[in-house]
Amino acid sequence: MHTRKPVLRVRAFNPEFLRVLCASAAKIYMKSNYDILIVGGGMVGSLLACALGGAEFKVAVLEHQPPAAPPEGGFDQRVSAITLASVAIFQAVGAWAAMQARAAPVREMRIVDATGTGSIHFDAAEIGEPCLAYIVENRVIQTALVERLHRFTNIHWVCPAEITDFDIKHDGSTVTVTDGRALGARLIVGADGADSATRRAAGLDTQRLRLDQKGIVATVRTERPHAENARQRFLPTGPLAFLPLAEPHTCSIVWSADNALADELLALDDAAFTVRLQKTFGDDLGKIESLGPRAAFPLALSHARHYTADGLALIGDAAHTVHPLAGQGVNLGFLDAAALAEVLLDARAKQRDIGAHAVLRRYERWRKADNLSMVAVTGGFKYLFGNDLPLVRDLRNLGLDLTDAATPIKNRIIRRAAGLEGDLPRLARRTA
């Protein structure tokens, strides 16, 4: 008697099933998991990465293009006034040494009302400091921070990375980039600027006030040295600032002007623009001998109603923008980054969920009041000095003169602006 062997029947394989299976396997293979994804590798996002360097977090920084190197033999058009608190943060994360050679100290600052006689003068010596701030080119800052973050093994620099999709959830989020990779994390940090795609994807509303102004930036060479002094003239159409650079006869200008005037100025050739600039600024630095390329950017005040949600936090311009007249914008972002890093490190030490809204709310409560007050102050100054009614003009000139004469009040203002007072993150507190 012969036993009948079983017959193996093979069903015809469905090609569509094979395609789906392969695609699913590819997605699983290409997915990388992190603790924290920082969307935006500009100055603020890169600083946050440095602040988390060496910690027990796996962090990825997503940036769409590599940072441009600082120009050789010249200066970047965009500069920032870096407060002493920001310098302390850079020192703490090990990035300041790479910036210092091109950082110009501001030892004095003079602000005048161009339509009156009021003025105020700040001097670092009056508060016992070597300087009030430093003027540093934006490219120098970003390059130094990106170079520093590359030294940490727990930080991954993902560049170029164009994000095609966000999937933000309370129990973990995913972003997809153009090459098909899916990057998952417990926390996504939006550091992607004023037009933040991260903020939009999270559905966080923003209050925004258009100022109908542009900021014109350029580099100029002057007959007289700037003597490490910053000068600002308030005009009815917006402030004009001359900021000292590392070369004694070279300044970066920031001319904030109503859109109509800004467009008129941008349409002028270099010779005609220089004449207008000289007439507006005066001869405090002698003749303006040369003018570099000009650029312009729109000005606006904005503030997100919320900085955080489950699995999400916003820092820098993604959360708030201010008028550049006080030179505080990027410094607020640096303090955001330092504060968020401290909150996350504390949460990890206590074994708490870094993506939980209850944890992230500590960061939001910490930073929101200071940021909102700076939005209000810079906006208020814009409208105060943009009003040329005789009574308003006389009152603001009197206010400038009285503040200048009240040394304790004036010094308190400048200490606060320099980041020497207030509820500062640990990284921003100077050790010496």
Image (cartoon, helix red, strand yellow):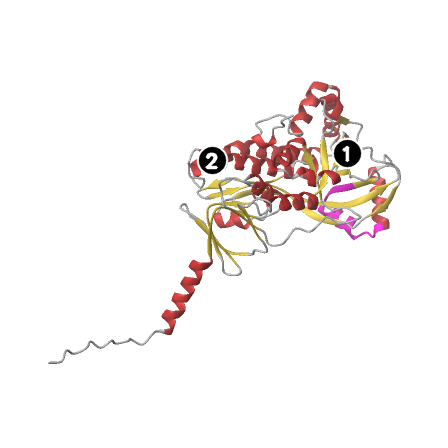
Q: Position of residue 271 (x, y in %)?
A: 86, 50
Residue found at the very far front of the displayed protein:
1
Residue 205 appears in the rendering: yes
Q: Residues within 10 Å of mark 2 (few under 14, many from 20)?
A: some
Q: Is residue 3 above or below residue 107?
A: below
Q: In the rendered view, does 273 fall on the left or right side of 173?
A: right
Give the numbered dot on residue 361.
2
Secondary element at tag 1: strand
> Which of these two is toward me, 115 or 284?
284
Q: Position of residue 91 (x, y in %)?
A: 64, 35
Question: What type is the residue that disc 2 sits on?
Answer: Arg
User: Is 266 colored magenta in this rendering?
Assistant: yes
Magenta region, residue range? 252-270
Circles 2 and 1: CB distance less than 8 Å? no
Q: Is residue 416 above or below residue 285?
A: above
Residue 237 appears in the rendering: no
Q: Residues within 10 Å of mark 1 (few under 14, many from 20)?
A: many
Q: Residue 402: which quarter of the image?
A: top right
Q: CA distance from mark 2 to mark 1?
A: 38 Å
Give the total number of marks visible in the rendering: 2
Instruction: Give the residue at mark 1.
Output: 230
Quarter of the figure that contains the N terminus: bottom left
